[in-house]
Image (cartoon, grey):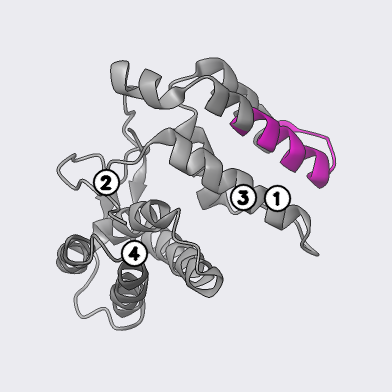
Amino acid sequence: MNTNIDFTDPDGPGIQPSVILNFLIKRCNEIIQSENPKVPAVLQALGLSALASDKELCEKYRKIISYSSDTKEDVFRSSIDIFQSALEHDLDRRSSQNPPLAEEGPEMGEKFCRHVMMRAIREGRQMLEEGDFRFVQVFVLLGWIGLQCDPARLAEFEATCHSFADDPEKILTRGRDVLKDAIFRRGTKSQSCVINPISN
């Protein structure tokens, strides 16, 4: 299995919207069954990113997660319906033909980066525990975003992903180690960074 991760785009590792959408459908179905169903803000942002080439669905999803008065379960089910509709619309092809324009995001510092890295670590752990490596690209994308404030660790993370392109399990194990090093043993003072919305 080759993860086909491309780091040449300055907006982040190349990943098709369908991969993110299928990942979010899986996570939403799991979270519905939990005691405190709530989608982390980082995953909501991934949803908006994956839907970016379909303005109607993107705006519909934004309203659901921002202003909906429905129950949490209804919000999850509505979100899943939107993701499934997006898959039927073939957003992979539409994104490649008409890539959404990236709007410059707000200045983000270490707190934001740590938040994203922690989510990447959690997602990587769950993938390892389940032995399910279909969405390792999502882990890589989150790790890449979280490490924007640490160029040295980012380079190490990218090198790790390249070295184990044919072994997603090692990408997860070694990649999580790099992220943990960045969070718990940061050797240099972090700097502010600007994170653009995820684009495809």
Report the amino acid beneath label 4: Pro
**Magenta stretch, residue numbers:** 67-83
* CB under 8 Å between discs 1 and 3: yes
**x, y (%) of residue 13?**
27, 46
Residue with the mark numbered 3: 26
Identify the residue shown where x is 46% and y is 34%.
Answer: 50
**SS for tag 2?**
loop
Give the number of the mark in front: 4 or 2: 4
Report the amino acid beneath label 1: Asn
C-alpha span from label 3 to label 2: 21 Å
Residue with the mark numbered 4: 168
Q: Quadrant of the N terminus?
A: bottom left
Residue with the mark numbered 1: 29
Residues 118 and 128: in front is 128
Q: Is residue 16 left or right of residue 78?
A: left
Report the amino acid beneath label 2: Pro
**SS for tag 1?**
helix
Q: Is residue 9 left or right of residue 142?
A: left
Q: Residues within 10 Å of mark 3 (few under 14, many from 20)?
A: few
**x, y (%) of residue 101?**
32, 22
